[in-house]
Image: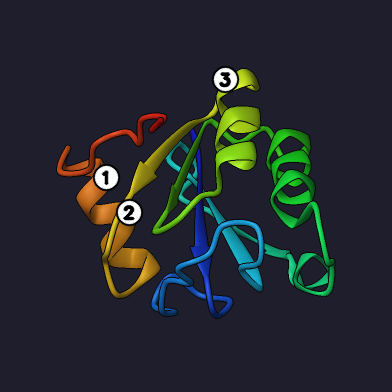
Amino acid sequence: MRIAVTAAGTTLRSPMDIRFGRAPVILIYDTETRDTEVIDNRSSDAMTHGAGLQTVQRMVSHTVDTVITTDCGPKAFEALNKSGITVYHTDAPTAFEALALYQHGFLKPMVKTQ
């Protein structure tokens, strides 16, 4: 399984970035190999519109199964769901802690709100 975590830095000890589409870095953790891939997402931050959808495209192209973030806009959330990617909410301070919470079953999937 490949889990994407929005982060402010390039290691699992980095702070979480609360944004999905405009997070500067996406860390992709592979649960089978225990490797972490660093995706530079800074180009999305410069966009006036569509940052979330561009980040969704990155997740799809990197074959992500799950996203862990603090906030995900409605268009990005819908696109992730249509792509078969489940989104989990966390307020964890670091990417490492977010992954640990997920792996221990403490995070719940985000649901679409009206």
Which residue is at the front of the view, 51 or 16?
Answer: 51
Compared across the picture, whether 47 is left or right of 28 comes to right
Which residue is at the front of the view, 94 or 79?
Answer: 79
Q: Which of marks 3 and 2 is nearer the N terminus?
A: 3
Tag nearer the camera, 3 or 2: 3
Tag nearer the camera, 3 or 1: 3
Q: How crowded is mark 3: few (under 14 residues within 10 Å), some or many (20 or more)?
A: few
Q: Residues within 10 Å of mark 1 (few under 14, many from 20)?
A: some
Q: Is mark 1 on a helix, strand or loop?
A: helix
Q: How crowded is mark 2: few (under 14 residues within 10 Å), some or many (20 or more)?
A: many
Residue 39: x percent and y percent? Answer: 71, 61
Residue at 65% across, 57% down: 21
Residue at 69% across, 51% down: 52
The image quadrant that residue 87 belongs to is top left
Residue at 72% across, 50% down: 55
Residue 45: x percent and y percent? Answer: 75, 72
Which residue is at the front of the view, 48 or 97?
Answer: 48
Residue 4: x percent and y percent? Answer: 53, 49
Dots 2 and 1: beta carbons under 8 Å?
A: yes
The residue pinned by badge 2 equals 99
Q: Which mark is residue 84?
A: 3
Residue at 55% across, 48% down: 73
Q: Residue 76 carries which label?
A: none
Q: Residue 102 carries which label?
A: 1
Q: Is mark 3 on a helix, strand or loop?
A: loop
Compared across the picture, whether 9 is left or right of 111 comes to right
Compared across the picture, whether 13 is left or right of 57 comes to left
